[in-house]
């Protein structure tokens, strides 16, 4: 019998059963039939989020910041209310620092294109790591090919941890920005961004954090971190798809040129020139994803009501249980650090003699949803020397029973293929 740290699993004061009841997809046939362990790809949505989106369309549908009629006023109120909630959720000193984007990918592209395009020169260096998601590689490659900026990569070691002791050796006064992942979407490693931010700031370089896999799963305080840019996605934290956030220090946003042009981002336009709107609107050209922002505001309320520290603690318990259970299966190789304070609940593994895609297909037949592949982190999996891994990732509604279903399904897949 494997260890379960709680007999009646709870997140804070809420039982998992009652939390699962908050999510319509988990209540019915789908929820009972499918052990959804693909939360790093996207999370399920609680009824309060679905209701907030529906209520917006049913009671307040209109465009924002434009008309004076009462629907437009109400739509604007809900949209801006969501911005305030998100600022409070991440400890931002002001909602002026919160730019709504489509997600982490767009947030990083915005910084690379606008800040990078304006402030970086040929020969300047952007320091990344080898465990980045493509969303934090490609925008910089595109910038490098346009401007002659160079990219330098901090390596990770065999345990899936960054080799932070090599940071000083890779540093030069040409490094003008560090852009790095907070929690690896393949290894689950929780990187020590506090040290990196201190190190970079001591050398006058700002830091961008890809927080796609951290903001949904634990507390974060951008002011305490003194981070310069932080990017995350709504859909991984109980919010709708197509909405995300770029947090940036106000002085950086003020100094940056617009990323896209169009309505909303201007104060005045002449035929030959224009003046930009204040931040954050300067970066929100066109009609925004109003319903998405409202839904994300509701998601933030929901997560806050459960408690981010409690969510993190519960997920870490699940992670310990999953890693223990998986490591008992012969032929399973696990990647990433052992459970601990620098490890979140994303577990990647391979099964000897079974391709990750075949394993994931077999698991699906058993009602277990995982993700196989390179997880949009090609350089990482290439360095591991595997074409693909199977990844199980957890959230606040995941259960020990789902992990038992995962291990049973792996045993079945092994007996089918080997
Ligand atoms: N990772 C995964 O299955 P978007 O697609 O913009 O919402 O998020 C991109 C992104 C950026 N950084 C990290 C660390 C991520 O994990 C992701 C999304 C998903 O791992 C889909 S590829």
Image (cartoon, rainbow, N blue to C red):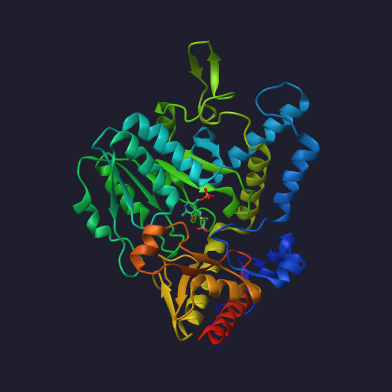
Residue 19 visible in the current orientation: yes
Between 384 and 34, the one nearer to me in the picture: 384
Between 220 and 59, the one nearer to me in the picture: 59
Give the answer, above or below, for where 132 lies relative to 279: below
Residue 199 left/right relative to 78:
left
Image-quadrant location for residue 327: bottom left
What is the residue that sits farthest to the bottom in this orientation?
A: 1
Residue at position x 72%, y 52% in the image: 48
Instruction: Residue 361: give x, y in percent of width and height.
Output: 59, 72
Residue 92 visible in the current orientation: no
Residue at position x 43%, y 75% in the image: 334
Instruction: Residue 167: give x, y in percent of width and height.
Output: 24, 54
What is the residue that sits farthest to the top in this orientation?
A: 271
Residue 107 left/right relative to 137:
right
Instruction: Residue 405: give x, y in percent of width and height.
Output: 62, 79
Instruction: Residue 378: give x, y in percent of width and height.
Output: 40, 58
Between 222 and 239, the one nearer to me in the picture: 239
| Image quarter of the N terminus | bottom right
Residue 97 left/right relative to 15:
left
């Amino acid at each position: 019998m494997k260890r379960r740290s709680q007999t009646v699993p709870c997140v804070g004061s809420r039982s998992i059963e009652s939390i699962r009841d908050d999510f319509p997809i988990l209540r019915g046939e789908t929820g009972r039939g499918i052990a959804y362990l693909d939360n790093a790809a996207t999370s399920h949505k609680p009824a309060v989020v679905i209701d907030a989106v529906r209520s917006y369309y049913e009671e307040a549908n209109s465009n924002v910041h434009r008309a004076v009629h009462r629907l437009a006023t109400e739509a604007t109120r809900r949209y801006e209310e969501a911005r305030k909630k998100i600022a409070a959720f991440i400890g931002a000193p002001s909602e002026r620092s919160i730019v709504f984007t489509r997600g982490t990918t767009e947030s990083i592209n915005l910084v690379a294109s606008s800040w990078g395009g304006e402030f970086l020169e040929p020969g300047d260096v952007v320091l990344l790591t080898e465990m980045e998601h493509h969303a934090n590689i490609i925008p910089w490659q595109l910038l490098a090919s346009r401007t002659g900026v160079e990219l330098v990569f901090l390596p990770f070691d065999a345990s899936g941890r960054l080799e932070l002791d090599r940071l000083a050796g890779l540093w030069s006064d040409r490094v003008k920005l560090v852009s790095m992942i907070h929690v690896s979407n393949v290894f689950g490693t929780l990187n020590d961004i506090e040290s990196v931010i201190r190190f970079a700031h001591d050398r006058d370089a700002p830091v961008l954090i890809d927080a796609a896999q951290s903001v949904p799963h634990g507390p974060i305080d951008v002011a305490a971190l003194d981070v310069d840019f932080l990017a995350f996605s709504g859909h991984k934290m109980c919010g709708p798809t197509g909405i995300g956030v770029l947090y940036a220090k106000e002085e950086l946003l003020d100094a940056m040129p617009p990323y896209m042009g169009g309505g909303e981002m201007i104060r005045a336009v002449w035929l030959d020139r224009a003046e930009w709107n204040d931040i954050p609107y300067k970066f929100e050209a066109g009609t925004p994803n109003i319903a998405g922002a409202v839904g994300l505001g509701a998601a933030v309320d929901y997560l806050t009501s459960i408690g981010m520290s409690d969510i993190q603690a519960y997920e870490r318990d699940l992670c310990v249980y999953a890693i223990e259970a998986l490591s008992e299966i012969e032929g399973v190789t696990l990647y990433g650090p052992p459970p601990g304070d620098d490890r979140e609940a994303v577990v990647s593994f391979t099964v000897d003699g079974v391709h990750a895609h075949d394993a994931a297909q077999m698991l699906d037949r058993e009602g277990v949803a995982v993700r196989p592949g390179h997880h949009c982190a090609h350089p990482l999996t290439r360095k591991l020397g595997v074409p693909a891994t199977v990844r199980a990732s957890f959230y606040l509604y995941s259960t020990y029973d789902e992990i038992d279903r995962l291990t049973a399904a792996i045993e079945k897949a092994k007996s089918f293929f080997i």
